[in-house]
Structure formats: C-alpha cells, structure tokens
Image: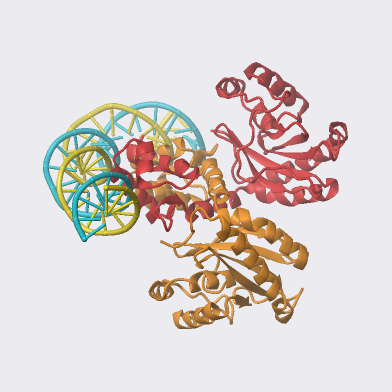
Chain colours: A red, B orange, C yellow, D cyan
Amino acid sequence: MSQTVDRALSILPLLAEGPADLGRVADRLGVHKSTALRLLRTLHEHGFVYRQADQRYRLGARLISLAQEAMENLDVREIAHPHLVRLNEQVGHTVHLAVHEEDEVLYIDKVDSRYPVRMYSRIGKPVAITVAAVAKLLLADLPENELRAVAEKLDYPLYTARSTPNAEGFLKELAKVREQGWATDLGGHEESINCVAAPIRGADGRVVAAMSVSAPNVVVTADELLTLLPLVRRTADAISGEYSGRTPVKEVTA
Amino acid sequence: MSQTVDRALSILPLLAEGPADLGRVADRLGVHKSTALRLLRTLHEHGFVYRQADQRYRLGARLISLAQEAMENLDVREIAHPHLVRLNEQVGHTVHLAVHEEDEVLYIDKVDSRYPVRMYSRIGKPVAITVAAVAKLLLADLPENELRAVAEKLDYPLYTARSTPNAEGFLKELAKVREQGWATDLGGHEESINCVAAPIRGADGRVVAAMSVSAPNVVVTADELLTLLPLVRRTADAISGEYSGRTPVKEVTA
DNA sequence: ACGATCGTTGCAGAGTTTGCAACGCATCGG
DNA sequence: CCGATGCGTTGCAAACTCTGCAACGATCGT
C-alpha cells in the first residue's frame, strides 16, 4: 500500500540472510543506489539496521529488543510458562508452546529436555506447519473455508517418509485432530523424533495456543510417549482454565 | 530522512507498549487516521504487525522470527555458547553474553543459574548501561573522544546507593576497567546482586563482546564471587582465541 | 431505534520521493 | 607514481506517491 515503507521493510528479511553492502541492497530491491541509501539511513536511525566496521549493513539491536517486548506481552506465554516448567520436571522431555499467526506457527516458549540428547528448535522459529503436532491443533481450529484456503496454499515438503504429502492428506489429518482434541507428530519432521500435543483454549473455546512434548526415539518409543498424553492434556487444560479466567483480549486469527 | 518510513517504524515501539487501535496510533503519530491505517496495512502485509480479534494491532510474528535470525547470525554467539554452558556447569551461577551497538548494550545469550534464586534478565533486553559489568567493558574499549561523548549523553539512574552517579564517576570507573582488563558490578543495579565480567576480543584486539557471571548475595558473597575471576577470564580468552581464529567480519562500533 | 464511535474508501492537492549525474574517496594494477 | 575502477554520497528537478479531507458503512451501547 505504501511503496516507500514496503521497500524499506523488504530490506530487513534481505539482511537477515547476512550482511550486505549498499549495492547489493539496491540490486535486490530493484532501485537506485541513492534510494536504497536513504531507506537504509532511515532504518538505521531507528536502530533496525546496524552498520558494521566494513560499512556493510546488518540487522540491528532494536529489532531484537522489540521482538523481546513483543513476546513478553503475550499473555498466554506468561500464564503457561510455570506449567511448562512443571511438566518438564515431571516428564523430562522438551516442552514447547506455540501460537498461530497469519499462516505461520511459531514457538513462543520452550523448556529444554533434561536428557543429553536435545532437539534443535528455537523460540521464535517458525515450525514445520504441515507436520508439527502443535501446528495441526492450531490449524484444525480454523473455520472450514479458511482452512481449505490455507491448506491449498501451503507447500508440503517431504522431510521424511511420514511427512504429510499434500493438502488432501493434511485436511484429513486435521479433521481427525479436531475430533480427538489432541495431535501427534510421529517422525513426520525428523525421522527419529516424536511429539504429543494438546490445545490451549480461550474463554470462547477457540484454540489460542498449543503445547507439546517431544522426545527422540532413542530415549522413549512413540508408544511410551503416548502414555504421557493424559498428563499433557491435563496441563493444557489447566493453562486454558487460568487463561480464560482473566482474558484481557482473545488471540485469534483475523 | 524518509518521512513515510520514519512514521511507519515509529509505530512499532509504540505497539510494543501494548496493543493499540487505529485512533490511538494516529494520535500518537500525529497524523490522520487514514494515513495511520495505510501505514499499518503495509506493516501488516510484511507481518510486522498483527491484527487481533478485537481489531486492535499488536506486534507481529515476523518481527520475532527476524530477530531470531539476527541473533543466529552473530558469530560471537555461536562460538561463545558452548563455553558459557561449560562455565555455568562449573560455577553454577547465571552466565551472560552481551554486545554493544549504537549506545545500547544488550544480552545476546544467557545460561541460567542452577540455584533456585534466579535473577531477572532476558536475552535481547538492553542492560543498565551505566552500572552493568559487561557494559563497562564494552564501553571502556571505545576511543577516548567517542567515549566522552557517550558518557555525557547518558542518563545515570540511581538504581541503588552504589550505582554510578554521573559521567565523571563513570569515566573514572571505565579507566580503571580498561587498565585492569575486567569489571565488576557490586550491587550497582540491584542491591543484592554482584557480577564479575571479562572481555572477549577480536583479532585486532578490540572488544567485541563481554561475558559475566552473576550471583545474589544470598548464595555467595562478593568476595567469593571474585575468586571466580580467573576462571571467567580464562573462559573469555578461550572464546577470544576461537573467535579471532576465523573471524569473517569484525563486530565493532561504526 | 437512534446516536455515537470506529474503521474504511475515493479524490485532488501538496509534498515527498525518485533516479540521474557528478563528486570524493579508497583500492588496485600498471 | 599515476590512472582506473568501484564504492558511498550529495543536489536537483521531475514525477509520482502520499496526505488529509469528507463521506460512507458497520458495529456497539443506550
């Protein structure tokens, strides 16, 4: 809608790939160098980009601190955290909390496994939306028409042989998930890692977040992990209860 | 330099304070509602802001994931992390890693204390620049003229009775820090918390980051904490060595 | 049912942004 | 040592984008 802002914002993901000099930025944006310079200057004034010793630009500190504030403002996170910690103490495995926003699902909290073998994931990282157990729960709650639209639009990368292959399979899986009220990912993202997940609901019953317990095959089998399901669901319900009790605003897709 | 972008970017810190509706954003920016709307729309398209169910705007997910990428690209962080973990295992206290950028010092990594008493701090959060031990190290490395300019410009909030009171005291402290090659914060930020910090240097000898060990009085006295200094310095030196060995770009102030 | 509040859209004027060309500066090769 | 090349930077006038207004529609509360 606003050309200038549009261009300026496009610079940020570009710099996320790594530092770039003026010429490179101008090229990638398809604008004159002087234009790119002025955009970068404005971004710089706000601390969103930073100029290295070699004059190249990279993402700046304000971006990091802003993101930090953004996460601290998420009410679900605040409420859920102690529950996640407690669950982690009980089961020992990695516990995740995720929310859905604009066709992306991302982790907003994590408590690491106490076992030496840890899985790779980071708070703030978008999750594999077509296979992750938490993603299934979050998407399954969308109204039918939206859901169909989203499913068609997605890519279905075959991380493993058990990854969701296409929109049809995804919708079918989501229907199942919606009905049973919980979800799993059995080696769909990484061959040796399984997850069990449960939804966290707001006062109006809509799913506002999802939490999961993940563990590699080498520690527990999928079947053993599934025995934790009741505990995971109870934890999620406890968070739901606390969250809907004093909900200031509902976190739902637009 | 660019009015439109300037305004658009100003919206983000504003939203970091909490969700706001269109009217509020327009007021704070001092522009017409229609103008604010178009800016918000552009930010929305890029995922930087998100629209809640109640139509209010808040910071979006792309901001969080971008910040995540920004941090993952920091070479110092990657290299330092395992060292921080090891140090934490040895001493048990909270370990921090911080960098300096544009008159701000912020934590880019943290390993939590193993003691039940934990201090409040978060990755991405700007640190109290006038009192934190890591901040002293990072600033002490600036060229004399820049340093003076920065010191004059800063605020000196009196967190405790032992906080740095003014520019003069700060410069004096920095001179000491520069000479001895390490720094402390003894109750300057929070009455009961002490820190010991050491610098991490790049190939050219400039300080690129600083690390610290922090612990509350109730666990160890300041004197006991100081006995850890040699270990902290050794760890910092190890990181420095590894970092300067294969430095792609130097992270230095412009 | 009515008024108030808030978000949204088309429009024309105003102002900002854009790309060009020229400059300064450093680096590199002859 | 000097010219060539590449980079970031600045003034300028034309062009296009953005701005604020006013009017509309929807939603909410009384």
Q: Is residue A251 left or right of residue B175?
A: right
Q: Is residue A200 above or below residue B136?
A: above
Quarter of the rendering containing residue B185: bottom right
Q: Position of residue A119 (x, y in %)?
A: 73, 42
Q: Nearer the viewer, residue A92 or B13?
A: A92
Q: Position of residue A221 (x, y in %)?
A: 86, 34
Q: Position of residue B232 (x, y in %)?
A: 67, 70
**Residue at point 33%, 44% (across, down):** A36
Q: Is residue B41 above or below residue B90?
A: above
Q: Is residue A241 left or right of residue A34?
A: right
Quarter of the rendering containing residue A10: top left
**Residue at point 68%, 75% (across, down):** B229
Q: Nearer the viewer, residue A120 or B236?
A: B236
Q: Position of residue B245 (x, y in %)?
A: 57, 58
Q: Is residue A234 left or right of residue D2?
A: right
Q: Is residue B15 visible?
A: yes
Q: Nearer the viewer, residue B28 or A89?
A: A89
**Residue at point 41%, 42% (across, down):** A11
Q: Is residue B31 visible?
A: no
**Residue at point 52%, 77% (across, down):** B178
Q: Nearer the viewer, residue B28 or A92?
A: A92
Which residue reaches farthest top? A168
Q: Quadrant of the C terminus of chain B?
A: bottom left
